[in-house]
Image: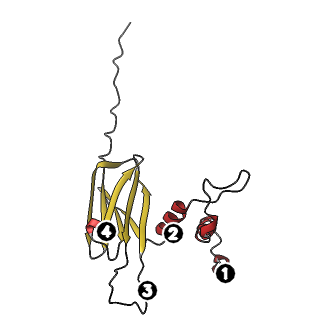
Amino acid sequence: MEGRMFGLETPLMTALQHLLDVPDGESGGAGNAAGEKQGPTRAYVRDARAMAATPADVKELPSAYAFVVDMPGLGSGDIKVQVKDERVLVISGERRREEKEDAKYLRMERRMGKMMRKFVLPENADMEKISAACRDGVLTVTVEKLPPPEPKKPKTIQVQVA
């Protein structure tokens, strides 16, 4: 079903739709002959799908930023929180299918696979004061703000009589 039916014709939705519709055989790579159009790599498509399917809330508090991400079925050891390229907060994890030899799935509706979100942190974020806590499948990453710079005091120059 296309996004045009629901009025979702924004460039972002068009790009996401394009990324999600790339078949595995058209993922690009080093094997393409010269002159052929190269598509996005498999890793890029996988990450785009993971980011589109991972809900998150971002809150600005008086002294911090809070990133709240749903990570159902993941323990704290399965979740990675990193800061890359100085100011990009990356939250990722992967939920794998439970394999039991004597069990057969009749229906599988819960989401499996990679979960990821990336956020560019603002200039006033303190990169040294980042904390993360996971409770009931909800991860909260808190990034403290740097104190505001003190306002500059005007410099007073004495006027001498000549």
- Gap in angstroms between the C-alphas marked 4 and 2: 19 Å
Circle nearer the viewer, 4 or 2: 2
> What is the C-alpha distance between the residues marked 2 and 3?
17 Å
x%, y% of residue 61? 32, 61
* Marked residue nearer the N-terminal end (2 or 3): 2
The kind of residue on which mark 1 rests is Met
Say what secondary structure mark 2 lies in: helix
Query: Disc 1 marks which residue?
Result: 5
Residue receiving disc 4 = 139
Precedes in sequence: disc 4 or disc 2: 2
What is the CA distance from the residue labelled 2 to the residue labelled 1?
A: 21 Å
- The image quadrant of residue 149 is top left
Q: Quick check: 108 above or below 51?
A: below
Closest to the camera, between mark 3 and mark 4, is: 3
Q: Quadrant of residue 62?
A: bottom left
Question: Which residue: 35% across, 55% down?
Answer: 82
Please identify the quadrant where the N terminus is shown: bottom right
Residue ID for mark 3: 109
- The quarter in which the C terminus is drawn is top left
Q: Residues within 10 Å of mark 1 (few under 14, many from 20)?
A: few
